[in-house]
Image (cartoon, rainbow, N blue to C red):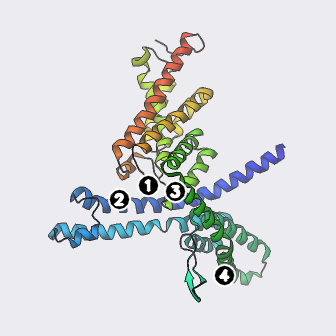
Amino acid sequence: MEKQTSKGSKAWKEFNKHVMTGISYMIPVLIMGGLIGAFSQMIPYVFLKIDPSTSIVDAVNSGNFSGASLAFLKLSHIMESFGFTLFSFAIPMFAAFTANSIGGKTALAAGFIGGYVANKPIALLTLNEGKWAPKAPVASGFLGAIIIAFMVGYFVKWLNKKIQLPHNWLAFKATFLIPLLAALFTMVAMVFVVTPFGGWVNTLIKSGLQAAGKAGQIVYSIVLAAATAFDLGGPVNKAAGFVALGFTTEKILPITARCIAIVTPSFGLGLSTLIDRKLVRRRVYDKQFYEAGKTAIFLAFMGISEGSIPFALERPAFVIPLYVVGSVFGALVAVVLGAVQWFPESAIWAWPLVSKLGIYILGLIVGAVFIAVINVLYRNKLINEGKLVVDGDE
């Protein structure tokens, strides 16, 4: 049993390492695309005060703008097209570097091809009213990119091991033979395996969410926030991140709940060190936690959840359920009241990209205050009962 657990743990670590490598290369593309796309929207709708229901092209054609305003509108259209084009490179970049992490640089190109086809599947000839015509199937998206990246990565790794050539032929092997075989493998796998399966799963998910309507989004937000907050960047958090990132890059569901749940525990536990004496007129933490609290709040503004770890380690049986509930509570307030975030980043500099930012911040405050107040009252109760002794109690 221990050997099986060890193998399972090793396989998960291996999977996690390769996927995180792909994500680390994909994130800068999303950040660049998101920021340029966001600036393109700020010019017309913030600075020029154009109604959000009017597109940039319609504003240009309206005849209401000239000179510098017209020039800025044309610039914003270029930035809009360029910024959101960058988003289309995110999944191919992810697949390329995930495959590269497994099979080396000879797997890079095939991984990129697989990721690109996951977004834009190959059209197949289908018979329609007696005539054959090309028709593209449903895209396999982020799920397809993960599958093909691993298939290509391990296929290239296997080829590198099995194909043994004389030293003079190594360049031929690395630059022609293996990339060609990998590309052909990618074509067959994407057309006959990955796209049909991934497209079917995506269709199933979309149909389920559409059928569930608002209730489906709320259930998704609850599960996503709870899984994100649960282990502060651990395996459960990462698994939730894979799912959320896939839905976000394919514009199926926003990533609002996850971004709020990443930072709410650190805000809440850090806040508890600032309000304890005002709330119960005494310290409820040992001295070192007051510095840890300030650090946790600073890290939360940077979109980092690990500042909560000292608090979670000190009393996990109470603190972990508390910040999970607080994160879910805060996420629900934001989502139900209409805050929407598509940009996959929880740091403060990404907040201007959130739709209904005031509601988003309200969700953060509600979740953080809930965690802070409950934790202070709980620790004060333990002190009163003699079950907790605090260094430096006043």
Residue type indicated by callout 1 = Phe
Residue at the location (42% across, 33% down)? 366
Residue 123 is situated, as x and y percent measured from the top left of the image, at 57, 80
Say whether disc 2 or disc 3 marks the residue closer to the N-terminus. Answer: 2
- Secondary element under disc 1, as helix, strand or loop, is loop
Please, is residue 214 above or below residue 123 in the view? above
Residue at the location (27% across, 64% down)? 54
**Label 4 crowding class (10 Å Cα cut-off): few <14, some 14-19, many 20+?**
some
Say whether disc 3 or disc 1 marks the residue closer to the N-terminus. Answer: 3
Give yes or no for contact between labels 3 and 1 (Cβ–Cβ under 8 Å). no
Q: What residue is shown with label 3?
A: 210
Report the front residue among 320 and 60. 60
Residue type indicated by callout 3 = Gln
Say whether disc 4 or disc 2 marks the residue closer to the N-terminus. Answer: 2
**Residue 180 image label:** 4
Q: Judge from the rendering whether residue 200 lies leftward or rightward of residue 158; answer left or right.
A: left
**Residue 14 image label:** none
Residue type indicated by callout 4 = Leu
Which residue appears farthest toward the front when viewing the image?
A: 129
Say whether disc 3 or disc 4 marks the residue closer to the N-terminus. Answer: 4
Q: Judge from the rendering whether residue 38 lies leftward or rightward of residue 216; answer left or right.
A: left
Q: Judge from the rendering whether residue 132 lies leftward or rightward of residue 330; answer left or right.
A: right
Q: What residue is shown with label 2?
A: 38
How many callouts does the rendering have?
A: 4
The CA span between labels 4 and 2 is: 39 Å
Regarding residue 293, the answer to whether it shows in the image is no
Say whether disc 2 or disc 1 marks the residue closer to the N-terminus. Answer: 2
**Residue 343 image label:** 1
